[in-house]
Amino acid sequence: MTLYKLSWMIFLLLANHSVLAQETYFKHQSLVNTEQTPSIVSSSHVATDSFIGCIDYKITYSGVNALDEEAQSKIAFLIENNTENLGVNKSYCFNEFGDKLEINYNANVADKTWYFADTNEEYTLFKSGIMKFGVNNVAEPEGFEGLAIKKLEVLGPQKEIMGYQTNQVLLVRESGIKTEFWVSDKLLRHPLSYQNNKFGYADEIYDAIKGVHLYQRKVIGDLFIIEEEATAIHAGSPDKELFILPNVDLYHW
């Protein structure tokens, strides 16, 4: 796998973004002007047993032990590139309506990604680049064969993380990318936050995982490793303003 292809695959996995529908943006933006969040207006599906709140993570980039000088060079490039573009800290926030917000800190490119359950659309805001703000309808897989699921297996109880007993779930994609999730059945995701989201086969993956991960380890190209480790759990309804879209131009891709 070439360095360019590997970098592109990482970008697809970590920053899903394509611009398909400007009309829906204006729908959400009109609700912003009335100081209401889209899901609160249109959704009545509240899951009382789902986790509501935010979880903070630290992100670690590393490489497999490689003696080959070329492999070491690739690893060094990927660590520097991802640290700069995607940052080393993030948060995931979930509200009671199945909406999700991902916030990237200390990142030069990625900023925030919103998923709204009522419209099944994902919005991504970038800090830099030609396209600053985009929307993606996630009703269908994106068409990249390498992201298809090859293996998805719940391996059972593994370890305690932040006071929660977690199960390990293994995901292997057709490209060979392996992701291990450690999740607790005490931190379940709202079903609406994934059941209609087919981008990257998220609906199938999270139907097996069920919960919000407390630890995640992704190995890409048998070379590059990305780890997300929870550092703080903030239970309780997130600030409604977090789910209001920014008033910036939407670019078509």
Image (cartoon, grey):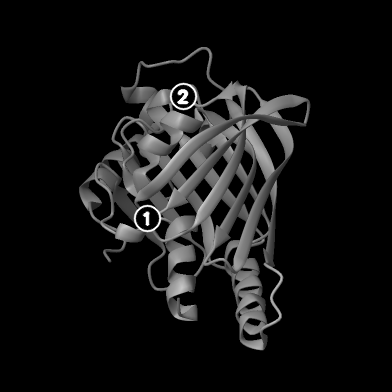
Task: Identify which amino acid the numbered label 1 is placed on.
Answer: Leu
| Residue at 35% across, 16% down | 44
Mark 1, secondary structure of its residue: helix
Most extreme residue toward the bottom, as rendered? Answer: 69
Position of 90 relative to 42 (above/below) = below
Q: Position of residue 127 (x, y in %)?
A: 52, 64
Q: Position of residue 31 (x, y in %)?
A: 34, 35
**Is 160 displayed left or right of 108 in the figure?**
right
- Bin the neighbour count of mark 1 within 10 Å (Cα to Cα): few under 14, some 14-19, many 20 and up: many
Q: Position of residue 36 (x, y in %)?
A: 41, 30
The quadrant where residue 133 appears:
bottom left
Can residue 15 be seen at all in this image of the molecule?
Answer: no
Q: Quadrant of the N terminus?
A: bottom left
Position of 218 relative to 61 (above/below) = above
Q: Which residue is disc 2 drawn over?
A: 190
Task: Identify which amino acid the numbered label 2 is placed on.
Answer: His
| Residue at 25% across, 57% down | 143
The quadrant where residue 93 appears:
top right
Q: CA distance from mark 2 to mark 1?
A: 24 Å
